[in-house]
Amino acid sequence: MKTRRMTMAQALIGFLKNQYVERDGHEHAFFTGVLGIFGHGNVAGIGQALQQNPDLPYIPVRNEQSAVHLASGFAKASNRLRAFACTSSIGPGATNMITGAALATINRLPVLLLPGDIFARRNVAPVLQQLESPNTQDIGVNDCFKPVSRYWDRIYRPEQLITALPEVMRVLTSPSDCGAVTLALPQDVQTEACDYPEELFRKRVWLIRRGQPDEVSLERAAQVIRASRKPLIVAGGGVLMSEASQALAAFVAKTGIPVAETQAGKGALAWDHPQVMGAMGATGSLAANRLARQADLIIGIGTRYSDFTSASMTAFQNPQVRFVNINTAELDAFKVGAIPVVSDARVALEQLTAALADYHVPAEYQSEAGALKTQWDAEVDRLFHLNNPGHPAQSEVIGAMWEASGPRDVLLSAAGSHPGDLHKLWRTRTPNGYHMEYGYSCMGYEIPGALGAKLADPSREVFVFLGDGTYLMMPTEIATSVQEGVKIIVVLVDNHGFGSIGGLSRSLGQGGFGTRYRLRNAASGQLDGDGLTFDFVANARSLGAHAMKVETIGELKQALEQAKSLDRTTVIVIETDPSVSVPGYESWWDVAVAETSEMESVRESRARYDEARKLERHHL
């Protein structure tokens, strides 16, 4: 067997360069590059290997957490068919990536993490940034990645890489098991040489499987659908990841079944499709929530039924409601007592369309759904054009952004009040035009995630919608966007605090405590002094962006048009009126309220909470 003498890090990079994926006859390289920050745990190993392999580009970022967010945004926008690796030093550089790892795994997105680790030979321990334990020498901070990784390994000897790497690729390319994969790399082992077999570096093509449903489960699902009078589809992220939009369109055209969308599934069909009822659940539309309440069958496609989708298990109130779940993952397919169809979404939809050749929903139900859609579309138009006196309402800002966006452009957000309003109001025109990270709803994802989405398809304009609280957490990847020439358009809503959690606090009877940006008041000892102000325009400019502040919707529209004409990142700052919110549309979210309190407002909120909980159901 021919061998090649290389360091472990050189072998790792050589392997990554030669991994390809194939789906539906299309083949391309899986890894696009490596993101990270060099330190004493990786500079001499991974850093040196990347230096001699410029065909796998290295992109330095400003924060290790945001590197993983960027990689997740890229993988999501690529329908999990491409990925980045992320590298860090040991210690804080590594643990900075844990939040990003959790985000990737919860969202089932392929990201490879390569944190530096302590010395395997131990004789110089404890090294800088090493965690020590009195119980074992075989532990370090990288063990914290275990619960948030789909696959985890520590490479103590350079030859262990040979058996670890195929497992890495198996997980990263799995439609059901993908997520963060962590290879902890001791810094001394990275630099150690080994005779690696030439076979390790050959081009290898990994087939992205389209799993087939078993005949019995498919027939049972078809029988239940045939028997239903008021079925509703809940389209999740699996529709987009499997590129099943056309199959879904054919299925609903044949059956007449209306479609509601999760946060991850929004855009599975265009907003103006006659059977699209809009968002589902706690942040859902009037049309979708009313149909869900009475539905006798829910067909979940690629959804994991988060509490926002199910409105904390209050959304489906028909006593006879049944469920059919189409999902590549058994974990999700078996939820809510469903008939599980463990399958690729596109394949299952195509086969169900053929099996249901004689089925269509009753005419009166189709008419009811059509009337609700018309009513909902009018409500969105109203919220887009409120002409609110003073500061504009957030819904007006969303409307202006939507009007400025093109058919293939992308709207991206993740946390705060924005996901709820966007889920209800944004009118997605094409698949992946709505990019919401709501599996983890991680503040700070927005700007690096947008860079990932833009890198995945530079032809699409990417609009980022975030609040001042999120911006302050992680604005620094604006500098990376300038460094790499990756343009995004950021609309920053300045509401002087944590607006979303402030509203939630008030609904719980707590008056927004601790959610406003205030100076400490020496007299009261509380944060109820004068307001803190920040110059977000100056901050964005200091990082290399074009930046401006606007006051009105008219000025915002002009600024958006200007941003579209520029070739670099733009940040547009606008204040909104927090008192004008988008309604809840007959839905609920379970956030526990203190059972006892000296505050009358909290006691009143608890009474409302106890009443609302009575609608929660077990679906067995």
Image (cartoon, grey):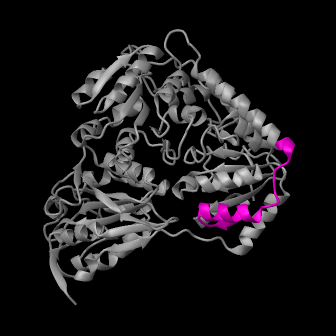
For the question of whether residue 525 can be seen, the reply is no
Which residue is outermost to the top? 389
Q: Start and end of the magenta stretch?
A: 339-365
- Residue at the location (61% across, 35% down)? 594
Q: Is residue 436 left or right of residue 492?
A: right
Q: Is residue 328 left or right of residue 109?
A: right
Q: Inspect the magenta stretch and tell me whether residue 340 lies in it.
A: yes
Q: Inspect the magenta stretch and tell me whether residue 229 lies in it.
A: no
Q: Give the quarter of the image for residue 386.
A: top right
Q: Is residue 302 left or right of residue 155?
A: right
- Residue at the location (46% across, 32% down)? 405
Which residue is outermost to the bottom? 1
For the question of whether residue 331 can be seen, the reply is yes
Q: Position of residue 14 (x, y in %)?
A: 23, 70
The mark tally for this picture is: 0
Q: Give the quarter of the image for residue 11.
A: bottom left
Nearest the viewer among 584 and 18 is: 18
- Quadrant containing the C terminus in the rendered view: bottom right
